[in-house]
Image (cartoon, helix red, strand yellow):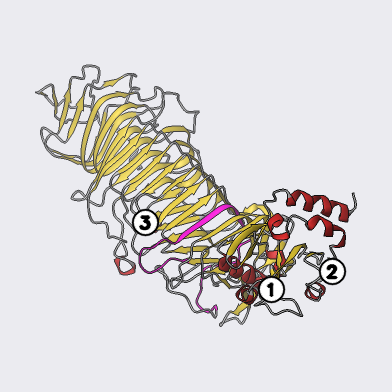
Amino acid sequence: MKRRDFLKRSLMTLASGSAIVFSQPGVARTSLANALGTDFRNSLDTIPYVASRIALKALDTAKTKVALLTEEGREGIFLWQPSDFSSYVAADRAEGIFLEADATAANTGAWVRVYDEVDVRWFGAVGDGSDATSSFAAAISLSQFLGFNRVVCRNSTKRFKIVELQITESIEIDLYGGTILGDFGPWGTQSVSGVPIYWTRNVFYSTATNAPSITLRNLTLNGQSDPTFLMAGGTPIIDFRGADAQGRCIVRFENFTLTCGGNRIYTTGSGITSPTVLFDYRNMEILLYNVDEVWINRSTFRSSPAEMVQVQCDDQRTRLRVHDCYFTKSRDNNPETKWSSSGLNVFNCHSSSEMRNTRFWFFGKSPVNWESDGGLIETCEFDFVDDSNGLDFNEAASYRHNQFVVRNSYFKNIAKVGIRCSSSNTLFENNTFEDVNVCIGYDGAVRGAPAKGTWLKANQTTLVNNVVRNCWVKSFNPKHADRIVVRAKGASGKFPVQLIVEGGSVQERQAPGHEATVTVFGQHVNLTAHGYFGDGVDALFHLTGTVRFNGRDCIFAPEPTKSVNTFNLIKTTLGREAFVLENCIRSTTLDAGNDDFLVLSPSFSIDAIHINGSPDFEGTTSTAIAITRDGKMEAPATLQQKKSSTKP
């Protein structure tokens, strides 16, 4: 079918009820059929094809009412509209939709594109990788003027370079798979060595003055960084700001990809003034600051040297939702190597914030630093972290934050701690761990940094109301030094960690060399245990410092032939009735030379240990200590002193 015949058929179809629309003063959107009139078919054969906007503007509008523009990237049907379009033409200086005719002033008429969306290519964005900043700015501005608040590109092969484009009003940018390119180059000089340093300049930004809502959908942002060049300092590729006070600033990333980001940590001598934003630096690729709501859905963040996404707030109003995302530090140009730094930083956001169905893979540092009170993390994966922790609620062992739930998540190949926190009111349940050095860790003695924000609390307090439930350990890595399921270390006897552990592991035994050293390590703890405990080649529980322990309805199953004690009490202080077992059994036989209680350098009250309703828990001891069983104190028996590991 010839192009003219195709146009005829299309226009005749439109005449009978087209959905394609255009804008005119007083009538926001009108069907093409109504605009042309019922007898427009008679003029179909005379519709001119014009190769440029210059030719379109030169047409005789008394004779020609419809024209087809064939200028590359700006193709479309234009209608002559006799009305006052002066404000529209003034708003569209890039001539994407509204064009003033050469012989007729805009206040009496204009050429108007038939449209139902705003395409950035109509405004001169070629899509060949060249700078399209001004074209995007023109398209966004007109879209906001028209009330669409949305710009698109329906060609997924197009690539647009954007440099420092400020967004002042709410907008959605949907490129249907297209790519935004960053401007990577030597934007600074090391003041000491004189060596040029590189980063990717800012692509999009907004300020607190305007605080617009912004959606980035169906696009890739490629920072074009090259790891062969020294990268230090710079500004975020995306920097979106909410207002100083609560409002309705909403930022959304939908089917968004970030790759090859080009920002590194600010360093002295870089020649860049270090911006002061909460932590005195902005070494992240995407910064979302004081935004009221953040939604990150079905998005990918990869191959970027800096912190990939940082969401932070001064007053805890930011409600963060991260769903169905993927983060990796693997480099695109060499996937077997990786960048350092984290994937997601969450600072001082709203307590209802959450992350679901999201995977983090191949990191050196903690993939997630969640430094906010409150958060739900569910059905997420943290896989391969070779120099830090998986999910960190206590970044740099410095801060205390409370009220977390982590459930149904998977942690694998983590060099330090799977879930680390200094917290009260936590629930960690139904999580799976494989080759993680310490699966879950509570650290009481942290510094805090209130000078950088009152919410960065010092931590000389008791950590309370913490629960670990149904923790499944598939295996440990023999190369890891600790190999502990749950570790709780209070700041002191005065400031312990209060913790309930329900079920230390599943009943299946681990392969030789892949077992835990202990299921629970506690130092200065108030510990309650329920359920089955059978993992550990040193002991099931290793307790030191000032301790209170309450075991109820427990099955203790030290693995035979592994020389395992049920409890190691090493330099332990127990007050009156500080250690109580109720309705507990030991279901396996201890090896010769092992005991239920290995005791070294104790400081016990005479009635510290009570065993009630537990006839199948023998309670053998390695040294003479008093045990009260069912209300009656048993005479201490002097037993043979044996050696035992004291490693944590």
- Magenta span includes 536: no
- Magenta span includes 242: yes
- Could you tell me the amino acid type at mark 2? Ala
- Could you tell me the amino acid type at mark 3? Ala
Within 10 Å of the Cα at label 2, are there few (<14), some (14-19), or many (20+) other Cα atoms?
Answer: some
- Could you tell me the amino acid type at mark 1? Gly
The residue tagged 2 is 51
Q: CA distance from mark 3 to mark 2?
A: 65 Å
| Rendered-image quadrant of the C terminus | top left
Of labels 3 and 2, the one closer to you: 2
The number of numbered badges drawn on the structure is 3
Q: CA distance from mark 3 to mark 1?
A: 68 Å
The residue tagged 3 is 397
User: Would you say 5 lies left or right of 570 here?
Assistant: right
Is residue 425 placed above or below 33 in the rendered structure?
A: above
| SS at badge 3 | helix
User: Would you say 46 lies left or right of 616 here?
Assistant: right
Asked whether the residues under the numbered discs 3 and 1 touch, taking CB atoms below 8 Å apart as contact, a structural biologist would say: no
Q: In the image, which disc is placed on residue 109? A: 1
Q: Which residues are magenta?
A: 241-270
Q: In the image, which disc is placed on residue 92? A: none
| Pick the front one: 251 or 578 | 251
- Residue 366 visible in the snapshot: no
Q: Residue furthest top?
A: 615
Name which residue lies at 50% across and 69% down.
206
Specify the quadrant of the image occupied by residue 88: bottom right
Pointer 3 or 2: first along the chain = 2
Residue 610: give x, y in percent of width and height: 15, 28
Name which residue lies at 31% across and 69% down.
451
Within 10 Å of the Cα at label 3, are there few (<14), some (14-19), or many (20+) other Cα atoms?
Answer: some
